[in-house]
Image (tube, rainbow, N blue to C red):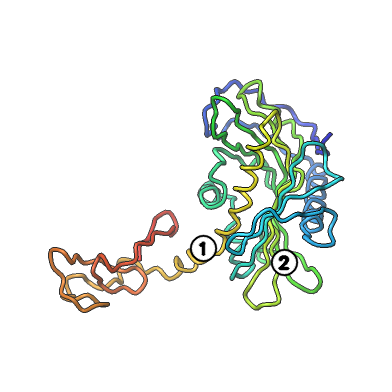
Amino acid sequence: MFDGFILAVVPSPSSFMASFPLPSTFFRCPPLSRKDEFLLQQFAEQASLDLVHYSQLEHGPVTWTLLEDDHDVQVFVGQDPTAPPRVINYISSTQVHATIDEVARLFQTETPHEYATYRRNFAKDIIDGALLYTLAQSSEANPRHFVGVRWMVVGSPVPAVIKHRDFCSIEGRYDFDLNGKRGWLRCFKSIELAACPDLEPTLGLVRGRYHRVGFVFIESDRPGVLQVTQLMQLYTGGHLPSWLQRFSAKRRARSIKHIEMFVRQNRMALMILSDAILVDKTSRRRCFLCQHKFGPFRMKWSCQQCGEVLILVLSLYTYFEFGQDFARV
């Protein structure tokens, strides 16, 4: 049986058909008592401590065996005698050139736009989600901190055969220190919440359980480099084929390799120039890079990083997010 957290609140009746995303009014979440808020925050803190402890690849409580090593990303499968039955255990590890502030920014999901960006970057299989409760927010003194209750749906690759899975969990983001090194983490652990009941009877969603899931970032011995681990100990619910569980877990584990790319994109976005200060295209007869004259087959293009006018084919075809829009350099 999974360890969970039950709150005595009124369930939310539902009669919607299984069409995602659900209406924003689907979940009715009554205010929590101070006691419930305190207990949930304590639960999240313990989940974060467990995440750091169980993410140790060596001399930790889980025996990890290397599954694959590809482009500096290692994926391991584990055996955890303390985990509930049918929990799968995977962990991935890599290093990224980034600061703690930069990686924490990638996992901000409080607003719909931030959550959509996160899903696009790291969790394309999540087809719906909702922030049910916010228990602790970031502040000037603690800008990377967050605790909340979140519901999400992981889409099935073959919905006609295998049902979608949903999860209701506590989410925590914390700074920490480990052996004199700064770190930051994002953890998930499933809870039972009356306001988020089993939705299989109404929506056909099979409820899964996050036993220990999350990212741990710790400063390495190299300046500007973080050691990253992603732990996944979860139960997918129902009777999902073991090969599909392994495939999905390994695919999610490999997503860790994209972190540095998204950090670089965010850095580039900070250097984007507005249209008002770009060099006027009519003032340039030659490409700023190659000095060839513009013509019918050498079209002009404004670079939003340097502001100069370039031949279109020499412009690096790189699109990245900048607020609500996309920029090209």
Q: Which mark is residue 121?
A: none
Whole-percent x, y for residue 142 in the image? 69, 64
- Compare residues 302 and 311 and report the one nearer the observer: 311
Report the residue at 57% width, 25% height from top.
161
Q: Is 275 or 94 nearer to us in this picture? A: 94
| Tag 2 residue | 183
Type of amino acid at the residue the image marks with label 1: Met
Image quadrant in which the N terminus is located: top right
Helix, strand or loop status at disc 2: strand
Helix, strand or loop for disc 1: helix
Q: Pointer 2: residues within 10 angstroms few (<14), some, or many (20+)? A: many
Amino acid marked by disc 2: Gly
Percent x, y of residue 293:
15, 74
Q: Is residue 202 above or below residue 282?
A: above
Q: Position of residue 221 (x, y in %)?
A: 71, 77
Q: Quadrant of residue 28?
A: top right
Find residue 273 and report its horizontal and vertical position in percent: 36, 69
Is 6 in front, or is 124?
A: 124
Q: Mark 2 or mark 1: which comes first in sequence?
A: 2
Q: Given this view, does label 2 or label 1 mark the residue nearer the observer?
A: 1
Q: Quadrant of residue 48?
A: bottom right
Real-space Cα separation, disc 2 to disc 1, in angstroms: 20 Å
Is 209 located above or below residue 17 in the figure?
Answer: below
Residue farthest left in this picture: 296
**What residue do we see at 76% from left, 65% from top?**
176
- Name the quarter where the C terminus is drawn: bottom left
Name the side, left or right, on which 81 lies relative to 170: right
Numbered badge on residue 261: 1
Which residue sits at x=54%, y=47%?
A: 119
